Amino acid sequence: AFVIGEPCVDVKDMTCIEECPVDCIYEGERMLYIHPSECIDCAACEPVCPVEAIRPAQHVDDRWRPFQESAKSAFDVLGSPGGSTKVDPPIEDTEYVKNFEKH
Ligand code: SF4
């Protein structure tokens, strides 16, 4: 699955949401999130991000890894919100934002 990292925080350009053919990119309070099990690895989102915040799992490095791990645990809790592109508060309480604050 593709992973959205720190550059998206407080940017939320949203172009990727329009590109995703399976609507697996969700909007949170401060950034967007790719659902790790809904993503079909089509790569359509990666080139359209103006801040290069999207990477495929095989290119996840130390800076992206916390976001990858947090997306997984957040959606484990949320399940598949489906239909809506808005994911609200629960996901913001995860390590995603906590890790961002450390940078
Ligand atoms: Fe959606 Fe494709 Fe990007 Fe996965 S790689 S989030 S399916 S656009």
Image: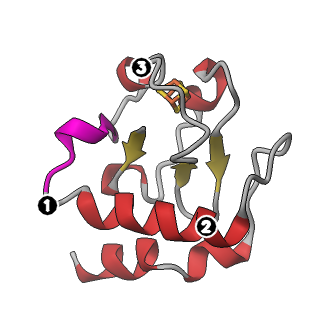
Mark seen at residue 76:
2
Total of numbered circles in the picture?
A: 3
**Ligand 1 under 8 Å from disc 3 Cβ:** yes
The picture quadrant where one finds residue 62 is bottom left
Query: Which of pointers 1 and 2 indicates the residue nearer the eye?
Result: 2
Check disc 1 and report the residue beneath it: 62
How dense is the environment of label 3, judged by Cα within 10 Å: few (below 14), some, or many (20 and up)? some
Q: Amino acid at mark 2?
A: Asp
Q: Secondary structure at mark 1?
A: loop
Q: Is residue 60 magenta?
A: yes
Q: Residues in magenta?
A: 54-61
Q: Position of residue 94 (x, y in %)?
A: 51, 79
| Disc with the residue nearer the chain's start (3 vs 2) | 3
Q: CA distance from mark 3 to mark 1?
A: 21 Å
Mark 1 vs ligand 1: CB below 8 Å: no
Looking at the rendered structure, which numbered label has been put on residue 43?
3
Q: Is mark 2 within 8 Å of ligand 1?
A: no
Q: Where does residue 103 sit, x and y in percent of width and height?
A: 21, 75
For the point 83% across and 45% down, the residue is 84
Residue 89: quadrant of the picture: bottom right
Q: Is residue 52 left or right of residue 98?
A: left
Q: Secondary structure beneath disc 2?
A: helix
Quadrant including the N terminus: top left
Residue 78, horizontal then vertical, whole percent = 71, 67
User: What residue is at 21 percent from the left and 37 percent from the top?
Assistant: 58
Mark 3 to mark 2: distance in Å? 23 Å
